[in-house]
């Protein structure tokens, strides 16, 4: 297991190098650069000389391959370079926001898991009854309602009680209450969809599992129906749900562009939009690398979880 | 003491263990109500073995599941009747009371050992579960009992096994675990639904011996549900024959096999080829198909297929007693039982030229080897370790034009791989295959294209080998299009009709899709497709093993007719020795990738030279209780070794009853005992 994990982590390297090559050169295909936006953006008087100087300072005057090599050498040292806009290290820029995004993703996962497992299970066990219909309506809603819109609904209902969540981010280790009262709402907003996807997955896989021969065997042994479901069926039915949850989680790290806007959160999504608008190549590259690493890592976690849940899968 | 009570109650039929009274089971489907079981009644006494025999869809499994109240909800329900266990009506129990009966008083063993155990739970827990629930044992005691149970069902090394998962056990082992689960709480009754159908013959014999032995020793009554009359003859005390949702004959095993009184029972017995009787030219078959249970005929349900049908058969049949404990539902039962109506509709033998089995060989396989590389979990994470599975190892044989070579062996012996190599679906690792003098292992695609016309295949599973989105006409016509054998749509349609008629299907079926046909009809479609290119050689890969016995007979007869009429040559791959004996001229026996024996059919069955051939013949049950009781249970010990680590020397020595030192050290030469009798054994 340990060997397998180490080898998988090592195999992440070529994947990430591929991502690095792609993102670096694709960004260079896009016309314009950060200097143009930075200096000309205000419509001020800018001489060609100033532009050249800034370019030189940022290293944009060097040949493309040289720039690439520079960046790659940095990557090898876990140095993502400096933001071309703020001059602060990219790592720093990301880490400030990552704390928030990661927490929202984790809260959403907890919320979705707590809700989707019972919902999906109930729907499957009471198939074609009003319980099932209700769950199906609720989950269809989760799939079709955009999370930012659902977020606005949440804010409006909070306003109804004349209360609004705090606007500034407080880390959870400073003040857990202030932290949670701020982040629980966006986590619910994005967790709804998450929960819906997972609940539907659990429902359909549980329906399938309940028809398996070994469920009949369990019943023929006189196992209590509750145990038949929890011990015999759910463990088998949760396997496909784990895959979905992993992908959803990775998405939540970087994909909450509009929802962050609605809740006025300074997360990864916001930073992404900002840096793209500013042509801040270094920051964009750094973020893409970070998110790619997250995806690959979560995939590994999902695979390892499979091994925990399903004894037929053994990594040696 | 238990044995004593079992013995006394067996004598007195006054207090049966289980009584089924007038049981009706209905399934509500979108296309109407299927009356899957209609008014069956039978009893099971303590310690007795009762068999329910019938073909698929006759309601035998459904009736067993309704005893356990495990019918799939909400479609299936018991519409009428009583199920009494020691006088208590199971149908009136609350759900929780019924749950307490399941696994405690009645256990059930299912057909598919591969899917009947939970893949994510260790087998220890699965065995201990009923003990923890029904007997409120604590973990330690349940564990001790589980170890004891594993020993009882013949699994050694129990400590280690308890922690293992089902995928780490072979099929036979899993069925032993299922039996251990069934025995856990010392039930009064075990229901076994086709317990050995998914297993190989040698393993089947082991499992059945085990069940019989345990039920006798522990005084447990056994209900065996099966389609295999041989099993019934060997193990059952009393027999119920079901047909189309009803029991049509009931009696002791001796009565049923000795004086069968229903034409269906007779048909069932005659349509299986038998190892203990001289080989007949043709199998007598039951023509036609069982009725649709949504709308069955009003009178005798077997009448449409019955050769002795008279006018009165359209009237409802009473279930009458014709002897002590022997009841049957036939208007002409007396005549049938008296043996007055013997001649079943023996289909006319085809007026064909006698087999021209000349010495001219059409197919020569020489030193064929097929190795598969597999990855195994190794020590290092980076260097994947590989192992070689020798699926086929140095196999040679020839087939003469117009003859049938049977290729038998248990699953995993490499027989299908040989077939695939001949069809060039796989490239062999080494060796030569010559078809009509042309070497095909290295043949160019152009040569192969021509040869494929001559070499065709019939697959095992008619359910998955036909494309469900194509009509029968398209399936049969497709090869004609590929080889441009029919000019124009009209000519193709005409040829398709001709092919369908040749295999006993009706022209209108060309418009149907495979799912609208029965299993036997589908297999006929597969045969028609194989015949479309007018081949001279057909690889038949287990063509009848997925079919019901009465249908099996029809297909075997069809294959024989076609061979006689079209001068075909067959390689007939199968695991059923009786079927192989019936259809083959010569037989090759394979074990772990090697040929053990090749000889003339009659020679093999009369004087098998190889101990493995002998073991296979011994393990196959024969549908006659008197013969069976006289036979010694000589089930082959142990299981098929892993092909990853085959035994040294003779691959069979680990299971061979007569193996000596030389067998462990040297691979036996393939030698000719006498003309045409080839064997690979040091001791033969």
Image (cartoon, rainbow, N blue to C red):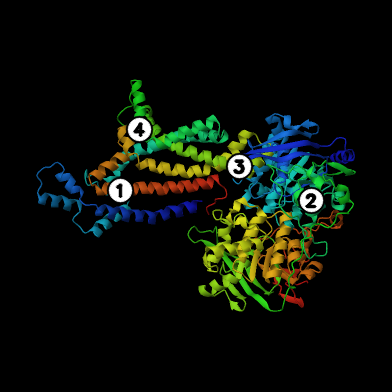
Which residue is disc 1 drawn over? A286
The answer to whether dots 2 and 1 both sit on one chain is no
Marks 1 and 3 sit apart, C-alpha to C-alpha, by 48 Å
- From the top left corner, tell me how far across and down residue A315 is, in percent: 52, 52
Is B309 positioned to the left or the right of B143 in the image? right
**SS at badge 2:** helix
When the figure is inspected, residue B91 is found, relative to residue B643, above or below; the finding is above
Marks 3 and 2 sit apart, C-alpha to C-alpha, by 34 Å
Marks 1 and 4 sit apart, C-alpha to C-alpha, by 30 Å
- Earlier residue among tags 3 and 4: 4
Which residue is disc 4 drawn over? A149
Mark yes or no: residue A142 visible: yes
- Earlier residue among tags 1 and 3: 3
**SS at badge 4:** helix
The answer to whether dots 3 and 2 both sit on one chain is no
What label does residue B264 carry, if any? 2
- Disc nearest the viewer among 1 and 4: 4
Marks 2 and 1 sit apart, C-alpha to C-alpha, by 78 Å
The answer to whether dots 1 and 3 both sit on one chain is yes
When the figure is inspected, residue B16 is found, relative to residue B570, above or below; the finding is above
Q: What residue is at 87 percent from the left and 49 percent from the top?
A: B255
- Earlier residue among tags 1 and 4: 4
Marks 2 and 4 sit apart, C-alpha to C-alpha, by 70 Å
- From the top left corner, tell me how far across and down residue A285 is, in percent: 29, 49
Which residue is disc 3 drawn over? A211
- What chain does mark 2 sit on? B
């Amino acid at each position: 297991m340990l060997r397998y994990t180490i080898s998988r982590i090592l195999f992440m390297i070529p994947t990430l190098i591929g991502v690095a090559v792609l993102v670096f050169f694709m960004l260079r295909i896009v016309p314009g650069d950060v200097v143009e936006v930075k200096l000309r953006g205000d419509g001020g008087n800018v001489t060609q000389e100033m532009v050249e100087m800034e370019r030189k300072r940022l290293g944009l005057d060097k040949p493309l391959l040289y720039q690439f090599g520079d960046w790659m050498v940095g990557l090898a040292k876990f140095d993502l370079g400096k933001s071309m806009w703020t001059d602060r290290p990219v790592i720093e820029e990301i880490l400030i926001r990552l704390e928030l995004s990661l927490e929202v993703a984790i809260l959403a996962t907890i919320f979705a898991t707590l809700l989707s497992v019972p919902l999906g299970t109930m729907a499957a066990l009471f198939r074609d009854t009003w319980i099932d219909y209700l769950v199906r309506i609720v989950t269809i809603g989760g799939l079709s309602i955009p999370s930012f819109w659902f977020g606005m609904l949440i804010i409006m209902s909070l306003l109804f009680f004349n209360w609004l969540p705090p606007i500034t981010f407080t880390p959870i280790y400073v003040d857990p209450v202030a932290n949670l009262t701020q982040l629980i709402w966006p986590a619910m907003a994005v967790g709804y969809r998450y929960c819906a996807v997972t609940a539907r997955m659990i429902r359909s896989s549980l329906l399938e599992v309940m028809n398996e021969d070994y469920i009949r065997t369990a019943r023929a042994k006189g196992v209590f129906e509750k145990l038949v479901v929890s011990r015999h069926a759910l463990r088998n039915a949760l396997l496909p749900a784990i895959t979905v949850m992993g992908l959803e989680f990775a998405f939540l790290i970087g994909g909450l562009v509009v929802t962050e806007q609605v809740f006025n959160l300074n997360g990864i999504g916001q930073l992404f939009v900002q840096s793209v608008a500013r042509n801040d190549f270094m920051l964009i590259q750094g973020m893409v690398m970070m998110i790619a690493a997250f995806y690959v890592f979560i995939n590994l976690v999902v695979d390892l979880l499979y091994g925990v849940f399903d004894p037929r899968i053994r990594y040696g | 003491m238990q044995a004593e009570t079992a013995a006394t109650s067996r004598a007195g039929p006054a207090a049966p263990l289980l009584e089924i009274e007038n049981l009706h089971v209905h399934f509500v489907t979108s296309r109407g109500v299927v009356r899957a079981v209609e008014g069956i009644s039978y009893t099971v006494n303590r310690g007795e073995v009762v068999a329910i025999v019938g073909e698929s869809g006759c309601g035998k499994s459904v009736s067993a599941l309704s005893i356990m109240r495990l019918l799939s909800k909400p479609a299936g329900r018991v519409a009428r009747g009583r199920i009494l266990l020691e006088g208590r009506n199971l149908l009136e129990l609350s759900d929780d009371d019924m749950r307490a009966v399941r696994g405690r008083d009645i256990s059930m063993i299912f057909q598919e050992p591969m899917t009947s155990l939970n893949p994510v739970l260790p087998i220890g827990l699965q065995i201990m579960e009923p003990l923890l629930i029904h007997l409120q044992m604590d973990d330690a005691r349940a564990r001790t009992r589980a170890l004891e149970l594993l020993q009882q069902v013949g699994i050694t090394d129990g400590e280690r096994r308890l922690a293992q998962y089902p995928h780490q056990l072979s099929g036979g082992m899993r069925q032993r675990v299922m039996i251990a689960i069934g025995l856990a709480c010392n039930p009064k009754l075990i229901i076994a639904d086709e317990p050995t159908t998914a297993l190989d013959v040698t393993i089947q014999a082991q499992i059945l011996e085990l069940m019989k032995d345990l039920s006798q020793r522990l005084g447990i009554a056994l209900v065996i549900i099966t389609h295999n009359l041989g099993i019934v003859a060997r193990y059952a005390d009393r027999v119920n024959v079901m047909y189309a949702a009803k029991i049509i004959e009931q009696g002791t095993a001796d009565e049923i096999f000795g004086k069968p009184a229903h034409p269906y029972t007779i048909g069932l017995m005659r349509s299986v080829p038998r190892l203990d009787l001289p080989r007949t030219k043709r199998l007598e078959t039951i023509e036609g198909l069982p009725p649709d249970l949504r709308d069955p005929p009003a009178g005798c349900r077997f009448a449409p297929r019955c050769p002795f049908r008279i006018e009165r058969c359209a009237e409802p049949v009473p279930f009458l007693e014709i002897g002590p404990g022997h009841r049957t539902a036939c208007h002409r039962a007396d005549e049938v039982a008296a043996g007055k109506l013997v001649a079943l509709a023996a289909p006319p033998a085809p007026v064909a030229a006698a087999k021209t089995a000349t010495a001219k060989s059409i197919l020569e396989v020489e030193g064929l080897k097929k190795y598969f590389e597999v990855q195994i979990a190794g020590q290092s994470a980076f260097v994947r370790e590989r192992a070689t599975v020798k699926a086929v190892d140095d196999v040679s044989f020839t087939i003469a034009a117009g003859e049938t070579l049977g290729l038998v062996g248990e699953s995993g012996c490499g027989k299908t791989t040989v077939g695939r190599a001949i069809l060039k679906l796989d490239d062999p690792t080494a060796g030569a295959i010559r078809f009509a003098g042309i070497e095909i292992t290295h043949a160019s695609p152009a040569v192969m294209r021509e040869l494929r016309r001559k070499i065709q295949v019939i697959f095992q599973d008619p359910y998955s080998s036909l494309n469900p989105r194509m009509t029968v006409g398209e399936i049969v016509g497709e090869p004609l299009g590929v080889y441009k054998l029919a000019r124009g749509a009209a000519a193709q349609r005409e040829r398709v009709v001709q092919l369908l008629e040749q295999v006993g299907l009706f022209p209108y079926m060309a418009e149907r899709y495979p799912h609208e046909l029965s299993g036997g009809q589908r297999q006929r479609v597969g045969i028609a497709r194989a015949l479309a290119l007018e081949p001279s050689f057909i690889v038949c890969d287990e063509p009848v093993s997925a079919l019901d016995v009465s249908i099996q007979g029809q297909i075997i007869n069809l294959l024989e007719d076609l061979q006689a009429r079209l001068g075909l040559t067959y390689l007939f791959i199968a695991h059923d020795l009786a079927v192989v004996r019936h259809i083959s001229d010569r037989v090759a026996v394979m074990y772990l990738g090697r040929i053990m024996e090749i000889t003339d059919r009659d020679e093999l069955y009369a004087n098998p030279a190889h101990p493995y051939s002998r073991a296979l013949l011994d393990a196959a049950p024969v549908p006659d209780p008197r013969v069976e009781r006289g036979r010694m249970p000589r089930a082959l010990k142990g299981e098929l070794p892993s092909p990853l680590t085959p035994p040294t020397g003779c691959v069979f020595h680990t299971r061979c009853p007569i193996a000596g030192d030389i067998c462990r050290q040297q691979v036996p030469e393939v030698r000719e005992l006498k003309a045409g009798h080839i064997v690979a054994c040091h001791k033969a």
